[in-house]
Image (tube, rainbow, N blue to C red):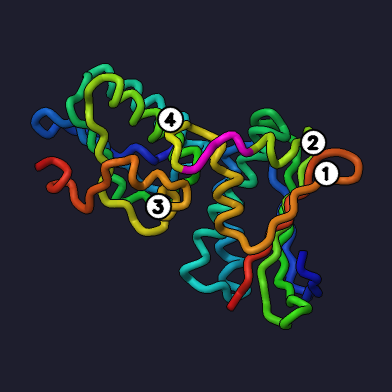
Amino acid sequence: MESIRTTNTQIRLHICARPEYLCVARMAVRQVIQVVGLEEDKDESVVLAVEEALTNVIRHSYGGPCDKPIIMKLSKIYRCDNNKPALEIVIRDFGKQVSLEDLKKGEPGKIKPGGLGVHIIQSVMDEIEFSPADDCGMQLRMVKYIS
Amino acid sequence: MTNVIKNVRHEDEALVLELAGEIDMQCSIELRDKFRELFRYKPQVLVVNMTEVKFMDSSGLATLVVALKWCRRNGSQLKLVGLVQRVRNVFEISRLDSVFQIYDSEAEALS
């Protein structure tokens, strides 16, 4: 794990765990990506990774669409090792505590529907940490470096 | 109801399904229902024109996988057309780009 220092650039978004709000989250991420200056060729990949993470929360942590909250925090951070900027995205839910292995049902290259979300997140992001939150639910921290 | 399904038309023995917008968990269910409806016509070729699809996640990909499996079981062909790079990336990351028949243009898919 990289040690980091956070700047003041921080946005919090609370959404209901319903698929109809995924487009709102995508819109917010696209705007933040522009603000922090992530390169154009990386931007939609990050939007995709966030989408997969939120979909996993709805599907696995909450067991389907519901009115329970998902909190997403987006920050521009600077890495301590080289002082280079990065975009940090933290997604917190209050559902079932699941392991990364539980979510990895799909295999890349195999024509099996579903379960590819974790593979996509791992392929796109530079750092990911998936851990149980203190009381209930899970927290996913993802980082994308800005060159 | 989303706006992802733009049009369906016949081109000789092929059915062409035109999609548009952003395909996510929300509209994947609608898309799956549409495929189910189209399979009743038992098309020899099902062309999915995705030229106007700007975003697709793994839910959308899973829906296309279900459609592909149906086509393979029933001797039909599923052809995808006009994937913009950001949509093509989803196939590449999932290593499913070689599993699907992907064409640049509808004319090429129908020829």
Quadrant in the picture for the N terminus of chain A: bottom right
The CA distance from mark 2 to mark 3 is: 31 Å
Residue at 74% across, 54% down: A129
Q: Tell me, for residue B30, which label it has, or none.
A: 4
Camera sees residue A24: no
Question: x, y (%) of residue B68?
Answer: 33, 31
Q: Main secondary structure of the magenta part?
A: loop
Q: Chain of mark 1?
A: A
Quadrant in the picture for the C terminus of chain A: bottom right
Question: x, y (%) of residue B71?
Answer: 28, 26
Sequence-wise first label, 2 or 1: 2
Q: Chain of mark 3?
A: B
Label 2: which secondary element: loop
Label 1: which secondary element: strand
Q: Chain of mark 4?
A: B
**Mark whose residue sits in front, 2 or 4:** 2
Circle 2 is placed at which residue position? A97
The CA distance from mark 1 to mark 3 is: 32 Å
Q: Nearer the viewer, residue A9 or B61?
A: B61
Tell me: B82 left or right of A112.
left
Magenta region, residue range: A104-108
Residue at 74% across, 38% down: A99
State if disc 3 and disc 1 touch (CB < 8 Å).
no
Circle 3 is placed at which residue position? B87
